[in-house]
Amino acid sequence: MASIFLLAVTAQPVVAQVSRIDIRKFGAAGDGRRMNTLAIQRAIDRVAGAGGGVVEVGPGRWLTGVLTLKSGVELHLEAGAVLVGSERRADYGGARASALLVAEGQTKIGITGSGTIDGRGREVAADVIRMIEAGQLKDPDWPRENAWHQKRSNESNRPGIIQFGHCTDVRVDSVLLKDAACWVQTYTECVQLKLEHVRVESNAYWNNDGINVVDCQDVLIRGCQINADDDGICLKSSNKDKRCEQVVIEDCIVRSSASGIKFGTASHGGFRHIEIRRVKIYDTYRSAIALESVDGGILEDVRVEDVVANNTGNALFVRLGHRNQQSPPGSIRDVVIKGLRVEIPAGKPDKGYEMEGPVVDLAHNFFPASIVGIPGHPVEGIRLEDVEIDYKGAEIGLSAVVLPPKAEGRQRSDGWGLDSLQQVPERESDYPEFSMFGELPAWGLYVRHVNGLELRHVVLRREQGGFRPAMVFDDVQRLSIDQ
């Protein structure tokens, strides 16, 4: 009994004096007009200097430039509080735009509360273009069109909302992140990262990834709601000596004009021990789930369970590529996808959103789910279980339409069949995308260069019949199909 009592006593929390400071005490004004950068930063510095605590942002519109969060500080936005980012590009630094809220190498930091952080992405992007055209800002991309026939300034010139690097014990909870000019929130090489009930409404400009987690460990993304112009929840790996590891994504709702949940495109170190469960995806232009390793990284021990995607342009895209020619190809192995339900529409799934994805040569309902490696480097150990994919509308392929001369990436076909497999290009070094191979010889599932594939209770449906078989397997070893 004595030892049990001692344990109970030592388990009691230690109550300490926690500093709480209202930014108004440092002269901040919530009128939406006065610049509050210095006042808010002084409040953050004071709390950090006192050993940690809470910086309180009350109701109002608090205009600010770049703020640096420091160890021990929680920035708390009350209901009705709006932290408003400056619309002037000059307020985000020189050669490379800073995010609005930054932290580097800090410990125990957080952003909490039901308030809003508004990045004013439309206004900032417009000011970037104004400065470029006035010769005040250099930009390598302007005004050249990209591969999708869009003109946009370089990502380095457009600020995001949150950028935390090399931090430990990070918590972002319940806030609304609105309209960034670039990636909404990015966490690089952080440890013990928790993103819970975070809301993202960011349709102001391109490259608006809702959540970017780069080479982080011990990550929980729970109960978040994402509506973004680029990838909804994206894991990246930019450091060949690091990887995203021990990540849980659960109970989230995602809308994207790119992919719902994506690993990549940056995939140098890789991704390991990832669990994704109970996610709803809707009105999403590209893939519901995209798992990509194209820069030499590993992708292994991934479990995806109970994902429902409605009005989404592609169900599943698993791609091992070789974009980074300076390193050998990476690997994809030990992936289980269970309880996946996807509805592919006949029309464009993100039509009507402010920044739509580009129009592709073929309707989205023409592209199958695909699992594709490269010659000599197969994807290994994949299981699809309890999967249903519904394709709406008619199947109309390139063999039924007249292509313009020299249509990029497309070849005229007299009709696909199993004798035409060799016509599917490898494109080992190309940017990975569900439509990258053009017209494929299967309408439901296309698999190439795979060693070890199990299909259990997989249902593929077409609303109207087509000219291709449902599934095609090319260079596939150890294939098991059960019901």
Image: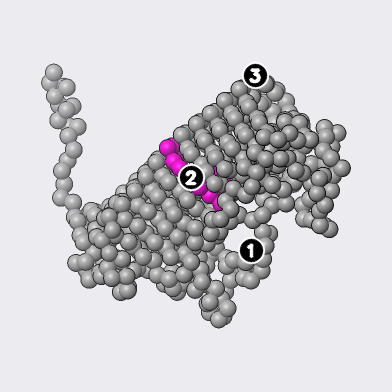
- Give the colour scheme of this rendering: one colour
User: Percent from the top left, x then y, of residue 422?
Assistant: 83, 38
Q: Quadrant of the C terminus?
A: top right
Specify the amino acid type for callout 2. Answer: Val
Secondary element under disc 3, as helix, strand or loop, is: strand
Using the rendered view, name the quadrant where residue 76 is placed: bottom left
- For label 2, the crowd category at 10 Å Cα-Cα, with few meaning under 14, some 14 to 19 and many 20 or more, is many
Nearest the viewer among 447 and 308 is 308
Q: Quadrant of the N terminus?
A: top left
Specify the amino acid type for callout 1. Answer: Gln
Specify the amino acid type for callout 3. Answer: Asp
User: Percent from the top left, x then y, of residue 442?
Assistant: 74, 35
**In this picture, residue 354 sits left or right of residue 115:** right
Precedes in sequence: disc 1 or disc 3: 1
Residue that badge 2 annotates: 254
Q: Give the distance between the C-alpha atoms of the residues marked 1 and 3, in whole angstroms.
A: 45 Å
- For label 1, the crowd category at 10 Å Cα-Cα, with few meaning under 14, some 14 to 19 and many 20 or more, is few
- Find the magenta span and give its range: 249-264
Indicate yes or no whether the magenta region holds residue 258. Answer: yes
User: Percent from the top left, x then y, of residue 357?
Assistant: 60, 54
Secondary element under disc 2, as helix, strand or loop, is: strand
User: Percent from the top left, x then y, of residue 231?
Assistant: 54, 50
Residue that badge 1 annotates: 150
Residue that badge 3 annotates: 482
Look at the magenta stretch and give its main secondary structure: strand
- For label 3, the crowd category at 10 Å Cα-Cα, with few meaning under 14, some 14 to 19 and many 20 or more, is few
Which label number is shown at residue 16?
none
Q: Give the distance between the C-alpha atoms of the residues marked 3 and 2, in whole angstroms.
A: 31 Å
Q: Residue at x 75, y 40 (%)?
A: 440
Indicate yes or no whether the magenta region holds residue 58. Answer: no
